[in-house]
Image (tube, coloured by chain):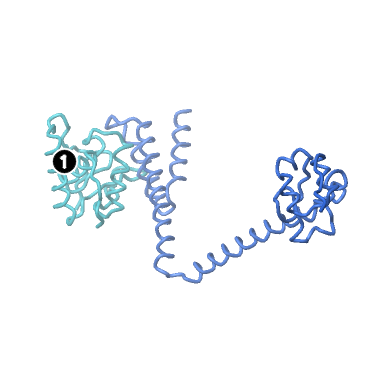
Amino acid sequence: MRGVRRTETLLAICVALTPRYLRAVREEQWRADLRDGPGLGISPSSLIFGAICSSVTARFHELLYRGSMLLSRFTKGDNMKLALGMVGAAAVLMGGAIAGIQASTNTEKVAAPPSMGDASHPECYDAAKMNDPNDFCYQTIGPWNSRLLSDDEVRSVVSLDQMISAGHPTDQIQRYYPEYQPVTK
Amino acid sequence: MENLGRITPATAMVLEVLLSVDSVWGLQVVKDVGKKPGTVYPILDRLEAAGWVQGEWDSTEERKGPRRRYYRLVAEARPLASEYVKVQQAKAPSPASRPSPVMSEEQWCGA
């Protein structure tokens, strides 16, 4: 009894796996084979396994066929509106992503807390200089940056000569290089 | 009728059985070929999908319940099928151990 139920369950799975247009044919065929197979010396379990292979293969080929049909719709240009629509949607999505990334980057710059600068490097965190492209930065040796560097980090990034040539005031240079003495003419 | 592409030895054996009769029950093919249904069923499906084989229902009314599925090799596929079988036999000349298609009582030879 349990064997019959298991066979029925497996058969139902096979039928469900089979593409819709083949289901009725295959189900009747498999049921007839399960009924008459043992007379030929073929076991029901072997038949069920065959039905599983058959249904999986049929499903695979159906998916393959659908995929190739979809591909041919694009390649043959049968549905150019759909193709252009998808390309347009992809472009919009990509544009949105780029804009989002840029916006988040800008937010990070703006969000550099002015209070942070008070602690050690006011020259790097001066809110008034925030949008000044000529403002000197010890991190990039160029425009503004939002990283808070320690004195040692500043020394490792910017040499004394670079500080002098950048035109920084003496007291600021001496903060990092206390041995520095400006040359008086 | 589509090209089958690669022909496996099992496919050639199925074709050989189909060539030997007009129409044959699917399970009879399984028995004659001596392979598992898991091998033969997909081959028959593939042949049917490619238009080489035509499936048809058992027309006898002696049996009640679900009908058996019979397979017939279409006429235009026969020359190519026999060519494939010859090529396969030349590759593996050991047909003696293989059971030959048997015309049993169970076998249906309709129309």
Q: In this view, does A57 lie above or below A76?
A: above
Chain letter for mark 1, please.
B
Quadrant of the rendered image containing residue A167: bottom right
Q: What residue type is labelled 1?
A: Gln
Residue found at the very far front of the displayed protein: A185
Q: In this view, does B44 lie above or below A78?
A: above
Binning the other alpha carbons within 10 Å of mark 1 as few (below 14), some (14 to 19) or many (20 upward) gives some
Q: Percent position (x, y) of residue B9?
A: 21, 39
Q: Name the residue under label 1.
A: B88
Q: Colour of chain A?
A: blue
Q: Percent position (x, y) of residue A52?
A: 40, 39
Residue at left 71%, top 44%? A159
Q: In this view, does A131 lie to the left or right of B89?
A: right
Counting every numbered tag in the picture gives: 1
Q: Is residue A120 left or right of residue B106?
A: right
Q: Percent position (x, y) of residue B25?
A: 25, 43
Q: Percent position (x, y) of residue B37?
A: 31, 36
Residue at left 42%, top 47%? A18
Q: Colour of chain B?
A: cyan
In terms of secondary structure, where does tag 1 sit?
A: helix
Q: In this view, does A101 lie to the left or right of B57?
A: right
Quadrant of the rendered image containing residue B92: top left
Residue closer to the observer: A70 or A128: A128
Quadrant of the rendered image containing residue A152: top right
Residue at left 24%, top 41%? B8
Residue closer to the observer: A54 or A109: A109
